[in-house]
Amino acid sequence: MTTNNIEWKFSEGLTGYEDAIGFMEARVEAIHKGTANELVWFLEHPPLYTAGTSSNTNDLLAPKRFPVYNAGRGGQYTYHGPGQRVVYVMLDLTNRGKDVRKYVADLERWVIETLAEFNVTGEKRDGRIGVWVDRGAGREEKIAAIGVRIRKWVTFHGICINVEPDLEHYSGIVPCGISAHGVTSLVDLGLTANMDDLDAALKRTWGGIFGGQD
């Protein structure tokens, strides 16, 4: 599906992490050369941990539990697995102001506006990348992670939002290096939303932030 030169790709089943990285690297190069459209890619991964460029090995608590990959993106350790929507965003920032901070802020806004479609208040926190939910009584939990890489002004990696992953799988890492707060999901918050519901909301909110969506 392509809308105003932005292609939307939806992968069924589970996509291997190395396969995803290889695909993204080739697509980023093609976008840079002008031989392919920008791409927003929706997928799920099998259970795995990824290490960002700021990762502390002490935060990998169970190194043999799932495969561990060096992601090359910013950030620290993150979990991916079934029930979590991963969206890899490949945009050419040469056509979008070459403003990396704005791009990251736009990704956060995209997540927050999407969660609002489910009456979930997602919030940013100073010094903590990602999107958080206030559970009351001083309890905050992370519902979405953001990790970005830029090559030749083309973005890749992106966001992940927890729909209904096995939250216990996060116990093998200190997610994003933050041990004082937990993680949550749409289902953990008591919602009946599924992946299709989330995808539809992500598509609805995209155009007002990034353009290129009717």
Image: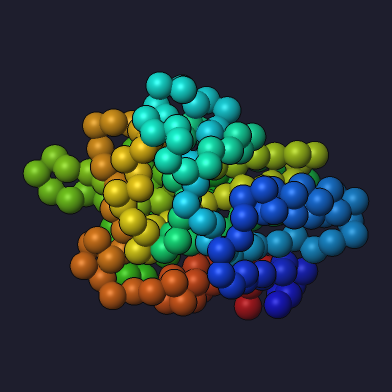
Q: Which residue is drawn at 65% across and 62% down?
A: 40
Q: Is residue 24 left or right of residue 130?
A: right
Quarter that holds the C terminus: bottom right
Task: Give whichever of 118, 28 is nearer the camera.
Answer: 28
Question: Residue 188, percent across and down?
Answer: 24, 61
Q: Is any atom of residue 205 visible in this view? A: no
Farthest left residue in view: 137
Give the side of residue 88 with respect to residue 191, left or right: right
Quarter-of-image position of residue 39? bottom right
Please report the residue visible at 67 percent of the width from the left and 54 percent of the height from the top: 20
The one of 148 and 192 positioned closer to us in this rendering = 192
Q: Is residue 144 visible?
A: yes
Whether 108 is drawn above or below 178: the answer is below
Q: Where is residue 113 in the image (x, y as percent from the top left)?
A: 41, 62
Q: Looking at the picture, does residue 15 appear above or below residue 200?
A: above
Residue positioned 36% across, 70% down in the render: 117
Chosen colour scheme? rainbow
